[in-house]
Image (tube, rainbow, N blue to C red):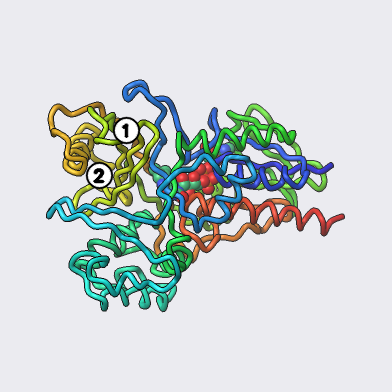
């Protein structure tokens, strides 16, 4: 039987392996680190005294590939979130609070009601969505909208930064429209937010590894691919330094690597290499907010401060700052002080003393999703007959997210299957 060698055990590599294993293909998964998950992982933090995620990860009910992946690994029930799509916001400058509640169907009737609109906005402000729908490939979000008005500050900017991890002045308008088209434009059922109930690893990683092992997939940690050796149009050897793996005729390779690592082993690959950081801060709250049980979660959008989102799971608050180039350069102690002040204000807690705060800086959280970089996203197919690509940065048509990573893994699995069938 021929074998598929998948390099990289992030969400893309895992999704690819899950699809291939489900179809009965022999596969080996190699990972440089000592654990799987890549940019989507959890770890025990002694300072905070519990398991933390490297960063808050939000999924939406529109993320069909990601939900299908969870179904396949038997972990669909491990997500939690509000029963209906509802997004509470707080403007930290004015103290105003509002909740964005899309209608059940695709027609956004809520825009017609002043009480349901975002404070400070009028009906005409929502027409910006139409300009995004008509955006050209070179347009940034700022090219299509009106920077500085209330709609910009309270909707477009936070949405762009959250969805694309890129400032609206440089983010691709077309990519943002894709998110809107698949979520808000379809109504409440497609934009229900969900997070992992316990941790990212417990939901998305450990059940996948258990599934793969049960299907006989070989999993090799601490295997960093140093080079691929080629002969003609085929890869012949995977070079892991201490170990070399020769490919048998019919074997295939899926490089499910971040863009820089993929470009390092695939000569001539023109990958989008510019990245943007995300900073997360996890805080053990001195006292959980009134009525908060251990298992409950809440999500609050923050406007006008440094953090953009506050997630709370029981007694832990986790704050996210996306497109955080300036913040990531500052010392963690400064960041802790800033986000704790915002948390205390948002949750109405005493500002002193400051509780334990863990700051996690993910410097290469996603590629910079500019029009130029989006144009560079390659598909699963490469110039080599037995090498396919996967990763959230490849051309899935979707921003670099779990959904994109899973779609890319699925596309790579489909490509290697098609190639195997055509050579039979
Ligand atoms: C802080 C943060 C917050 C995020 N928030 C969200 C969110 O709210 N919603 C959402 O959907 N997405 C979010 N994302 C994005 C999401 O995490 C990624 O899109 C997804 O995890 C990418 O998966 P991947 O498999 O494409 O890449 P990676 O996770 O980077 O996986 C690549 C794997 O390859 C391994 N590797 C690298 N080089 C080699 C080598 N030479 N040999 C072998 N292995 C190698 C790496 O160790 C890694 O495990 C967030 C990301 C971060 C960092």
Q: Residue at x 44, y 73 (%)?
A: 137
Which callout, 2 or 1, points to the residue nearer the camera? 1
Q: Secondary structure at mark 1?
A: strand
Any part of residue 260 in sight: no
For residue 221, side relative to residue 119 (left or right): right
| Image spot of residue 228 (x, y percent) | 65, 43
The numbered dot on residue 316 is 1
Where, quadrant-wise, is the C terminus in this rendering?
bottom right
Q: Position of residue 12 (x, y in %)?
A: 57, 47
Label 2 residue near ligand 1, CB within 8 Å:
no
Which residue is rendered at x = 12% and y = 55% of the image? Answer: 94
Q: Residue at x 22, y 52 (%)?
A: 90
The residue wearing badge 2 is: 327
Give the mark count.
2
Circle 2 Cα neighbour tier, 10 Å, few/some/many (<14 / 14–19 / ≥20):
some
Q: CA distance from mark 2 to mark 1?
A: 22 Å
Mark 1 and mark 2 in contact (Cβ < 8 Å)?
A: no
Q: Which mark is residue 176?
A: none
Depth check, front residue: 43 or 417: 43
Picture quarter containing residue 2? top right
| Drawn side of residue 166 relative to residue 347, left or right | right
Classify mark 2: helix, strand or loop: helix
Residue situated in front as seen by the camera: 10 or 96: 96
Determine if the C-beta at disc 1 is less than 8 A from ligand 1. no
């Amino acid at each position: 039987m021929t074998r598929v060698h998948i390099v990289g055990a992030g969400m893309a590599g895992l999704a690819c392996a899950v699809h291939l294993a489900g179809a009965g293909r022999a596969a080996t998964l190699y990972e440089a680190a000592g654990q799987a998950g890549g940019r989507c992982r959890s770890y025990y933090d002694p300072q905070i005294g519990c398991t933390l995620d490297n960063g808050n990860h939000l999924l939406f009910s529109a993320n069909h590939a990601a939900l299908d992946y969870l179904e396949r690994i038997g972990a669909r029930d491990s997500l939690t979130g509000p029963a209906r799509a509802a997004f509470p916001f707080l403007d930290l400058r004015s103290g105003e609070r509002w909740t964005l509640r899309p209608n059940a169907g695709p027609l956004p009737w809520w825009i017609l009601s002043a009480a349901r609109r975002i404070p400070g906005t009028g009906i005409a402000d929502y027409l910006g969505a139409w300009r995004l729908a008509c955006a050209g490939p070179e347009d940034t979000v700022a090219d299509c909208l009106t920077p500085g008005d209330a709609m910009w500050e309270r909707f477009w900017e936070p949405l762009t930064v959250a969805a694309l991890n890129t400032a609206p002045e440089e983010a691709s308008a077309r990519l943002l429209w894709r998110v809107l088209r698949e979520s808000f434009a379809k109504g409440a059922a497609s934009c229900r937010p969900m997070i992992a109930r316990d941790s990212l690893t417990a939901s998305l990683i450990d059940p996948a590894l258990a599934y793969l092992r049960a299907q006989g997939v070989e999993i090799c940690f601490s295997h960093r691919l140093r080079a691929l050796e080629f002969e003609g149009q085929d890869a012949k050897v995977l070079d892991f330094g201490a170990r070399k793996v020769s490919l048998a005729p019919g074997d295939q390779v899926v490089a499910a690597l971040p863009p820089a690592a993929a470009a390092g082993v695939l000569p001539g690959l023109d990958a989008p290499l510019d990245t943007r950081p995300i900073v997360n801060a996890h805080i053990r709250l001195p006292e959980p907010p009134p009525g908060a049980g251990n298992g409950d979660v809440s999500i609050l959008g923050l406007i006008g401060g440094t953090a953009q989102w506050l997630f709370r799971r029981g007694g832990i608050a986790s704050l996210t700052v996306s497109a955080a180039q300036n913040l990531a350069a500052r010392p963690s102690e400064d960041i802790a002080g800033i986000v704790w002040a915002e948390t205390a204000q948002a949750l109405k807690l005493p500002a002193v003393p400051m509780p334990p705060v863990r700051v996690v800086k993910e410097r290469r959280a996603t590629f910079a999703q500019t029009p130029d970089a989006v144009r560079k996203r390659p598909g699963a197919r490469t110039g080599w007959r037995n090498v396919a690509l996967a990763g959230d940065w490849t051309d899935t048509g979707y921003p670099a997210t779990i959904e994109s990573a899973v779609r890319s893994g699925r596309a790579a699995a489909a490509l290697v299957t098609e190639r195997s069938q055509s050579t039979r």
